[in-house]
Image: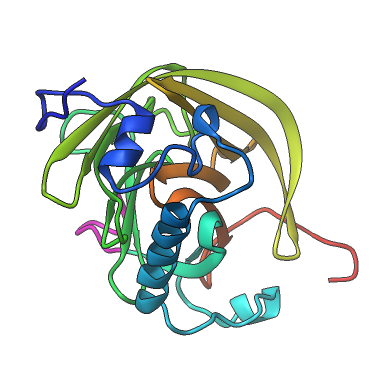
Amino acid sequence: MRLGRIGMGHIGLAKMARAFGLMAGLGLAACAQGPDRTPLELEVLNAVREGIRKKTPAEPPVLTRALLNTVPVPQLEMIVERVDLRDYLVPQDLGRGTARRSGDGTPGRIEQWRAVDDITFTFRDGMLVASRGVPFDGLLSAAVAADGQGAAGPARGGARVMQYRGGDNEVFTLSLSCHLENLGPVTLEVVEEVYPTTHLRESCEGAGGTITNDYWVDRRDGRLWQSRQWLGPNTGYIRFRLVHLGLGARKNVTLMRGS
């Protein structure tokens, strides 16, 4: 298929990786080429690693509940798996608090989180729908299966559309067909506290590859405590954990033994 501007063309996962400067096989399940990396792959991975590290030069402290209990604002931990980069995000004020209902008529609760260097991630009901400032991957928008009924995570399977801006300002549209699976209850530990969650898995197929997103949703109030989501062909998967709700926040948790 030809690459097209927004609304004009769609692109498969493997072609999208090449369009963004990657060889097939960098994190795309259906395009894996084995453990050996080519010189081009190594060059691109090093560029991604250095680009991200330049934006986050300081290593975060070792995380403990005692440390978090001194922090006044909520903290969302993010780990970029491909380069083993860890950072902590704070909620962005959207004008009416740190979250708001969508103003475009689309169901779902919008939240935006940012790093100290103004890299931002936007979520709808906990699902990643946009990024700004991430080297090599500019997620402009994503149509996700949010229902706005309170619980985070995908409400159903079906079509998913993601739009990216490439290095030459071309806008690429990636269309996926997703299947939602409930993997059952999981007692999730997050920095010395445990939560009763349901593990949801979203498996999505596109032309030339598959991606898998995982969500751990609190069975009591629908809060998303942890997720693993695919951002794009260069960054790959990011793990998010809601490690702190902020001082004074009401929560119902169980402390781990010995804590």
Give the x, y percent position of residue 227: 55, 45
- Residue 208, picture quadrant: top left
Residue at image location 33% in from the left, 34% down from the top? 108
Q: Quadrant of residue 101?
A: top left
Quarter of the image containing the C terminus? bottom right
Q: Is residue 62 magenta?
A: no
Does the stretch in magenta take in 99?
yes
- Name the main secondary structure of what is drawn in magenta: loop
The colour scheme of the drawn protein is rainbow
Say left or right for 20 vs 189. left
Residue 101 visible in the displayed image: no
Between residues 244 and 232, which one lies in front from this camera angle?
Answer: 232
> Quick check: 156 above or below 31?
above
Q: Is residue 129 left or right of residue 202?
A: left
Q: Position of residue 122 (x, y in %)?
A: 32, 50
Looking at the image, residue 126 lies above or below residue 149: below
Q: Residue furthest right?
A: 258
Location of the N terminus (image quadrant): top left
Relative image position of residue 53 (x, y in whole percent): 42, 74
- The stretch of residues the image draws in magenta is 92-100
Q: Position of residue 209 (x, y in %)?
A: 46, 26
- The residue lying at 30 percent from left, 35 percent from top is 16
| In the image, farthest residue toward the front | 39
Residue 82 makes an appearance in the image? yes
